[in-house]
Amino acid sequence: MRCFKNIAELIKTKRLGHPKAYSQSELSHLLGYKNGQFISNVERALCNIPLKMLGKVSEVLDITPGELKAAILKDHEETLNNYLATSQVGNVSTLRPSENTETGSASTGFTTSSTFKMSSNS
């Protein structure tokens, strides 16, 4: 599951703490969105700010590039951790030539052997 909570918290904090105290609708419109719902969705961590909008968001809300980068990287790290924790690598097989016991010679077929599972130790 994707994580957007860090960017959501940053946007909301900066919007509410800004001297102009933009409403969600005002900020959405300042960013060029016709629908005022955009910032609401961002602040509820339903979606992320598109990369092409980061400069405008930074400018309007006085967010430093470092703050944006830190929030986005934290969200990506949490997203990766979520996916790695829930993904399963079950039943990975290795192939080896099988022996034909009737003729005593190696056959051209392969058999599967040894399964293993990876675990995440994060």
Image (spheres, helix red, strand yellow):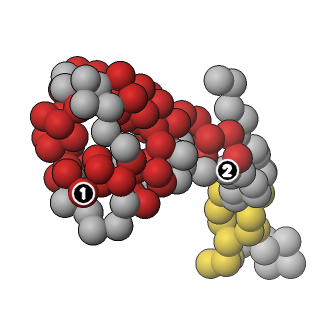
Q: Residue at x 14, y 43 (%)?
A: 56
Q: Residue at x 52, y 53 (%)?
A: 46
Q: Secondary structure at mark 2?
A: loop
User: Which one is earlier in the sequence, the residue at label 2 or at label 1?
Assistant: 1
Give the vertical position of 6 relative to 48 (above or below).
above
Q: Where residue 98 sits: x, y (%)?
A: 73, 68
Residue annotated with mark 1: 29
- The kind of residue tagged 1 is His
- Cα separation, mark 2 vs mark 1, equals 39 Å
Q: Secondary structure at mark 1?
A: helix
Please state which of residues 49 and 113 is positioned toward the viewer in this rendering: 49
Quarter assignment of residue 8: top left
Quarter assignment of residue 65: top left
Please state which of residues 83 and 54 is positioned toward the viewer in this rendering: 54
Check residue 87 in the rendering and tell me which mark sits there, or answer none: 2
Which residue is outermost to the right?
102
Q: Where residue 114 sits: x, y (%)?
A: 78, 51
The answer to whether residue 50 is left or right of residue 89 is left
